Amino acid sequence: MNREQISALAHTGHPVKAPLDDDSVHRLLDRAVRRGDARVLDLGCGTAEWLLRALADHPDLRAEGVDTSADSLARARREADARGVGDRLVLHHADAAEFTASRPFDVVLSVGATHAFGGLLPTLAAARGHLAPDGTVLIGEGFWENAPTAEAVALLGDLTDLATTVDRVAADGWTPVHGHVSTWAERDAYEWSLWGALAEWALDRPDGPDSAEALRTAADRRAEWLTTYRDAFGFLTLVLRRTPR
């Protein structure tokens, strides 16, 4: 099984690919979308769950999503049509870091996808290139809530603490107007959902060709979470506007 297949199965019960519950997602979108007729862009949209929820909440909103996964975009299209918002959603099968658009957007979001750009600040640079002058950015990124072990750093990368993360964003020319630090409950619910869903898929198919691998992967990822990064990793989602020069 490839990484994309494993991710799709793991996110069956948690379509938002970040440790955020439904209420948090709704509040963040409510703060980011300042006009009902906004144009919204998701860089690294996956199955476009953020866009689908924004479209459902705002009947005049228009949205575009960019992702390299054809399977994820196909699922996004099916779900958009099923929810009755497909006519207001455009999906681009492309590298988000290389995507260009003819018009700026009122909201640019990228939650849990900064790896596609090489980190937080490169993601903000890409968002800036698509953003209308008075637009907002909604971005989600990990940080170290407590001092990490060397194993956690090797697994999750070169993150910083919460204050340093926000300071870097501010120094890059952005003003936070809202933010949310995922709670312990949100983070735990996310991880239990991921690896539980993958394990259940395998248990329901005991004779399937991929079942043993899926069950082993679920156990390995659950162990990594519990023993390597659960006590150290946090997740921050920010709503940003440009700081006046």
Image (spheres, rainbow, N blue to C red):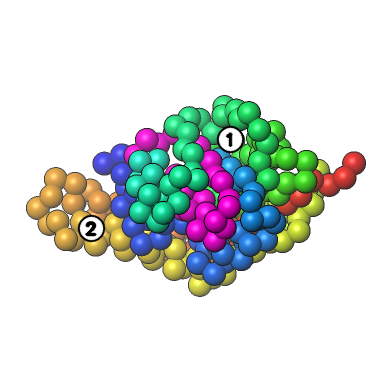
Image position, residue 171 (x, y; %): 81, 45
| Residue in the image at 14% along x and 45% along y | 209
In the picture as drawn, the residue positioned furthest to the right comes out as 245
- Quadrant of image for the N terminus: top left
Image position, residue 76 (x, y; %): 40, 46
Answer with left or right where residue 140 lies relative to residue 8.
Answer: right
In the picture as drawn, the residue positioned furthest to the left comes out as 207
Residue 117 is tagged as 1
In this view, the residue in front, 194 or 12, is: 12
| Residue in the image at 9% along x and 53% along y | 207
Circle 1: residue type: Phe
Residue 201 is tagged as 2
Image position, residue 221 (x, y; %): 37, 55
| Residue in the image at 50% along x and 72% along y | 185
Quarter-of-image position of residue 233: bottom right
Tell me which label, 1 or 2, sits earlier in the chain: 1
Residue interval drawn in magenta: 44-72
Answer with left or right where residue 242 lies relative to residue 202.
Answer: right
- Callout 1: helix, strand or loop? loop
